[in-house]
Amino acid sequence: MEDVATLKIGDREETLPVVTGTENERAVDVSKLRSETGMITLDEGYVNTGAVASSITYLDGEQGILRYRGYPIEEVAANCDFIETSYLLIYGELPTAEQLENFRHSLRRHTLLHEDMRSFYNGFPRDAHPMAILSSVVSALSTFYQDSLNPGDPEQVEISIQRLMAKLPTIAAFSYKKSIGQPFHYPRNDLAYCENFLQMMFAVPTEPYEIDPDFVEALNLLLIVHADHEQNCSTSTVRMVGSSNANIFASIAAGIGALWGPLHGGANQACVEMLERILADGGDVDKYVDMAKDKDNPFRLMGFGHRVYKNHDPRAKLIRVTCDRLLEKMERNDPIFDIAKKLEEVALQDPYFIEKKLYPNVDFYSGVIYRAIGIPIQMFTVLFAMGRLPGWIAHWKEMHASPSKRICRPRQVYMGPTERQFVPLDQR
């Protein structure tokens, strides 16, 4: 017998089918609820609503599990670089050696920006936030590549994917160079993805730039652990915008805008800003821990706990090792790092944090690593966008390939005034 849920509305009973996923996640299918009952569900923030059936990423917040296309994030991070991870997410399978080399080659062919796009950067104020520039320039790609905007043409979609993956690091690095008044540094196609980004960020014409392999390794890992996280705010935004058949450049630009928010991608920036605040106030970690425990105090420790994970964030466990190794190697006398370590010790040992499962999350460690590498704080969320790009692309592709695709159109429960008599202007 088919598994069903029973909904009682007054004297009526309605049966709703129950859907079971491959990992035994169960969901009540309410897709026909309105047509059969005239009612809808109300779920602020969609925290209990499955908007889509997806085969890209599996996340179990209670058990601390994250898998890309069925592969545990720990195994992916140990065996793949970011480009191989991107291929897995976008195309659904681990690539063969030939497929991976072809993918790398195709990305190298598209790293340059059209020279006319450079003039865009002159139109932005010098202090413009790099995320604003990133979203604007990605959206503008649709005006330069009008030959590949049709989401229904697989060849056009493929070339757009390659262009986005290849050009986003260039767009991002150029936005940083603009902010500090340095000349743009062109990409080098003989370098790997992360190496290329670092040299575009930090190289100057007046002297050679030596790429630190530990920085490359750390950046590569950060991009991998950020590559996808199922139906988060920005990914849902990409899918919602894309559901209207908007081109992939417009859809990704919208996702970048969603990621910019401090409650989403901006959390790692907020974490470092919190550490700087503690430092400016004398570096008294215990004081701020007590403030965080005080329910009447509005202060909150950034970088601890997670909306989904009720256990250790598996991504944080991965990059914590890299974070410790990087800081030990650098031997930098940065009090921010000392404060971060003290906070980490508290979170892992204090009964209050353990009871409430407020473990250091991916934002806590990634912000510290970005700072160690030399990435300026305003670029933190830009790096997050670079990492999340293959996940956005994968979801955009999956949505368009679904035979049940529909334009997203949430309902609402109206709570405003009932019909009112209009009052002419001279009588108000």
Image: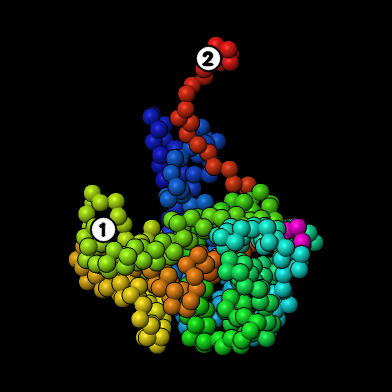
Total count of labels? 2
Q: Nearer the viewer, residue 376 or 361?
A: 376
Question: Which residue is rendered at x = 76% and y = 64% of the image?
Answer: 116
| Whether residue 169 is visible | no
Q: Secondary structure at mark 1?
A: helix
> Where in the figure is residue 387, as x and y percent of width and height?
54, 70
Residue in the picture at 44% in, 64% down: 269
Q: Nearer the viewer, residue 164 or 124?
A: 124
Mark 2 or 1: in front is 2
Residue 118 falls in image quadrant: bottom right
Q: Residue furthest right?
A: 147
Q: Which residue is mark 2?
A: 428
| Picture quadrant of residue 253 | bottom right
Q: Which residues are magenta?
A: 141-145
Q: Residue at x 52, y 19 (%)?
A: 419
221 is higher (above) or lower (below) than 278? below
Q: Amino acid at mark 2?
A: Arg
**Residue at 66% across, 76% down:** 185
Furthest residue in direction left, as rendered: 351
Q: Which residue is mark 1?
A: 292
Amino acid at circle 1? Ala
Within the image, what quadrant is residue 5 found in? top left
Q: Position of residue 296 (x, y in %)?
A: 23, 49
User: Of the residues under marks 2 and 1, which one precedes in the sequence?
Assistant: 1
